[in-house]
Image (cartoon, coloured by chain):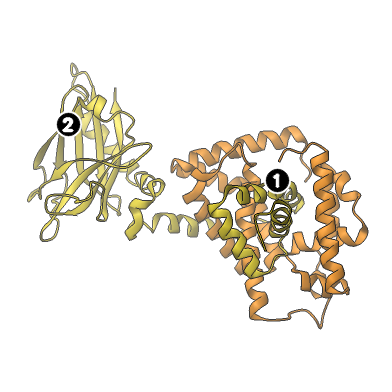
Chain colours: A yellow, B orange
Amino acid sequence: MNYLEPERLDALAAQYVLGTLSRAARERLARLARGNESVAAALRAWETRLLPLAESLPPVAPPERVWPAILDRIQGQRESGSIWANLGLWRGLTLAGFATAMALVVVLLTPGPETPIETLVVVLAGQDARPALLVSADRSGRTLMVKAIAPVQPAGDRVLQLWALPEQGSPRSLGLIPATGAASDVVRLDLPASAGLALQNIPALAVSLEPQGGSPTGLPTGPVLYSGPIQRLY
Amino acid sequence: MAPDPDKRRQRSERLAELLARTALSNQQAFAELYRETSSHLYAVALRILRESGAAEEVLQESFVNIWHHAGSYVAAKSQPLTWMTSIVRNRCLDQMRRREVDTVTIDDEEPGMMLADDRPGPMEMLLSSADALAVKSCVERLEAGQKQAIALAFYQGLSHSELASHLRQPLGTVKSWVRRGLERLKACLDGAGLKR
């Protein structure tokens, strides 16, 4: 039986969307659709035809508990091993620390009367939304200042690696952050260009735990410990 | 209940925008998307699964899925509500078909059981939805048996064998009602210029 013969495919897609296919046939077609655009298109065409019928169902408000449960699920996956596989998710995590971040930005960067503000600031917060590291840079400077807000000591032979999380594409390493024994230690990381340019189109930074010498693959391999959105004060 | 075309279009644009912002991990947009669509999607799940616990769970899983895959929604290819509805329905239908394997026959003894509630029946739903949509005249052109089989399958998630026992018809008859009904719907809808 050739699934891809157009008429056969169309009939199967129709039954799939209507819901009458058997379990095995449903699963086969769903699998096929994932790798084959003409199968996916046949399903979409039938969804477009039939699913508007669902709009006439009288709405039923779901119980209040559903939304918090959803939030828990999308926030509770931060520690999962595949976290880096899902850019959307870990970019979302940066929201958690946002309120704290803004509060800190205001406190730390309230300008003196004659200081022009041309600064990027990132407050990197952990899962508990407590800020751990403050990264700042002059827009025109080529140095990132990484300041520990709380003592940061990765276990054993691990190091912290700082990453730029671009809007599109893979994270880019910004360098390693040595363990800081005490709060307020400052580490300087060199940038390939001015901070304004080097971090253009980068909405957020994150810190992952990596083996000595940094990630062997050029991409984050360890868990994300901290993340935070870049605030551009210019 | 039957929004006019302009309102439907505006709503679609709004939902597409919320999905786009959700794809950028904007939780506020996601929360709004939930507020805008959850009672519709919950109704879809509830109708098929007939069990609030199971429907709640599907709704929850679907929204987690939407959060992670909002970026794969392509506005040019489908309406946002259609896309979201398909996520919910597919989960429900997968569950229904699995149940069917687990418990071979569920309703042979009481064929009327599943429809015995005070909610509008599938036929009423089919006709009321058809009021506002391009499918109206197409649905009306179906023969009675085809119409009924398609409505039951669509709204209640019944399989061929469940349809047969509900409608007290041989399996073969029901299968051909469904198949011919779908063919006619397609010919009619595509002929009416509905964009694929």
Q: Residue furthest bottom?
A: B109
The image shows residue A230, relative to residue A65, as above or below, that is above
Q: Is residue B39 left or right of residue A165?
A: right
**Which numbered tag is attached to residue A48?**
1
Task: Say which quarter of the image contains residue B153.
Answer: bottom right
Query: Is residue B125 something that shows in the picture?
Result: no
Residue B59 percent location from the top left of the image = 58, 59
Q: Are marks 1 and 2 on the same chain?
A: yes
Residue B187 percent location from the top left of the image = 83, 46
Q: Point out the frontmost of discs 1 and 2.
A: 1
Q: For mark 2, what is the residue? A: A191
Task: Say which quarter of the image contains residue B178.
Answer: bottom right
Q: Is residue A196 left or right of residue B71?
A: left
Query: Is residue A130 something that shows in the picture?
Result: yes
Please report, as a chain letter, where disc 1 is located.
A
Is label 2 in a helix, a strand or a loop? loop
Residue A54 percent location from the top left of the image = 73, 52
Please report, as a chain letter, where disc 2 is located.
A
